[in-house]
Amino acid sequence: MQELVDRLVADGLAPGGIPLWACYLSAMLVFGGIVVFVFILPIAGITTWVERRVAGRIQSRIGPNRTGPAGFLQWLADGIKSVLKEDIVPAAADVPLFKLAPYVVITGFVAAFVVVPFGGPLIIADLNVGILYLTAVTALVVVGILMAGWASNNKWSLLGGIRSAAQIVSYEIPAGLSILPVVMLAGTLSMQDIIRHQGWAPWTWHVFDNPFTFLAFFIFFVSALAEGNRTPFDLPEAESELVMGFATEYSGLRNLLFFMAEWGNLYIIGAVVTTLFLGGWQIPLALAEHPVPRTVLQFAVFFAKAYFWVFVAVWLRWTLPRIRVDQMMVMCWKYLVPLAFVNLMGTAVWMVLFPAGLGGVRVLLCLCAAALLGAFGRRVVFHIRRARLTRQDLSFNPLSTARVIG
Amino acid sequence: MGLGTYLRNIKDAALTIGDGLAVTFSHLVRKPYTVQYPDRLPDGVRVQDTLPFRYRGILEVDLEICTACLACERACPIDCIVIDAEKDKAAGGLVMTRFDIDMAKCMYCGLCSEPCPTGAIHHTPEFEGADYSLESLVRKFVKTPVLAYKPKKGGETDPEIAPILERGMRYVNEFASADAEG
């Protein structure tokens, strides 16, 4: 961002007489505004549509398809509906806290976008504590959720808030410990520098650097899902047990803010995974020499990678049932945390033994990932074939076996 | 928990989640089963035609084969069926002057069609019963007084009534048999 302003000033594009700090500030505000209203709000909304369409197809139904082409405008309709709803505050609620809570949640979520890269030089602020800042502000969400749970004066809300606090605080640990190997490899906390430490080719990505970072990638993704309150870790909401958990008493715009934060968080998870492990916006330099098409291409690459993980999160949600509270804790403390420590130590030892990394191991890990994908593809084909063989039994559609009755 | 169990748990978790993801992914490339009733059905298809023979929709009476035995009226737990029938020597049997079913009261239990000897009263697959007044939900089957049906020895010979009776008996018999379809 700073480079961009510097270049504009150097090119004489900035109006004269304005001090440099004012240029920086106005550029920040404009870019921040653009990011919030052109990117964050639609991305959170469109993700709800994507989620519902994917959920529909996974359950062999269609999903929303009436509002706009293929139901694409459903998120706008839902948003307008939510805004128009009455804003109800329960009589016994702690009113100031109750009203404040959604804004704390949304602040924690939007503030995370400050250090999320978008591609090339596009980033609101390339803080030198980037990833640390991100883990810190996303933890603000738990304050908001706990606040909402307490202030609603409702036992479901309170249980949801408590569960959320337990869950997010627990999973911060494996998530943080899985970030550390990457930080050690890159030698920096800055999001842009972590990306610059990787290349466009898969074997230069951090995830394939050594077996420990390969494992750290999965641990981080699972922990990030848990921090984002996504199924199978959606215990704080748990519709079947807690109605809607911490958001039970919220209606209208405040409810919308909670859900915007939840779905927008998916994109942050995808973006952070992409940044830390999957080469971020790196593209072969030969593809585009001019800065503008290069930035566009870098944005497209980064967005595609990040949104793929949004899709994976949605896909996981409609595959796995919600786990129990004790299982959630066992998974964190008995499996993810020890493994994350192994990764941390392993990466440290690896860096001492092979300061320049091992090219062979990187390629081998790439091949491993390809083999995993291949095995997965074979299972998918197997399930499609089996479904085709048993099509008759599976057919619930009365129109497919239409009978005319006398 | 030994190390073996620990590692096996991790392996099991990874494999089963992977296979679960494969199952759900295979659904993404299949056709949805959804029937988009009522406005996006395939051409010429009515959902009513696809429902099972014994679907309990709106009640209907085939007056041609109704014996005016009043079994249905007695069976109805909420008295939504009203039948008026009188002996008429001149006409040669029972004459029905009224056969009303109040569909607003009917709870679609099917108890009326069970005792019917000929299957005259039966449910249809029709279910679109929305209307603007309660009065119009009362179905009046007798327009002009009509002679009740008398079963003939040796089976029905009238070509107009025979198919109706056959259908009615099929309906009744499907109640009786344990392996009934639908």
Image (cartoon, grey):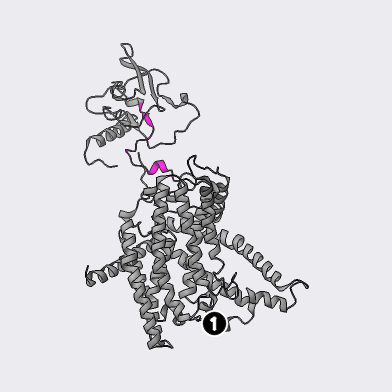
Bounds of the magenta segment:
B45-62
Toward which corner of the image does residue B122 lie, by quadrant? top left
Q: Is residue B48 magenta?
A: yes
- Is residue A27 visible in this depiction of the protein? yes
Residue drawn at x 25%, y 35% is B175
Q: Which residue is disc 1 drawn over?
A: A284
* Viewer-side residue, A390 vs B107: B107
Q: Residue A190 at x, y = what percent?
A: 53, 75
In terms of secondary structure, where does tag 1 sit? Answer: loop
Give left or right: position of A68 versus A227.
right
B112 over A260 or under it: above or below? above
* Viewer-side residue, A137 vs B65: A137
- Say which quadrant the N terminus of chain B sits in: bottom left
* Viewer-side residue, A169 vs B117: A169
Which chain is home to disc 1? A
Q: Residue A300 at x, y = what percent?
A: 56, 71
Q: Is residue A141 magenta?
A: no
Q: Residue A72 at x, y = what percent?
A: 54, 56
A84 over A166 or under it: above or below? above
A299 over B108 or under it: above or below? below
- Magenta: predominant secondary structure element? loop
Give left or right: position of B75 versus A296.
left
The residue type indicated by label 1 comes to Pro
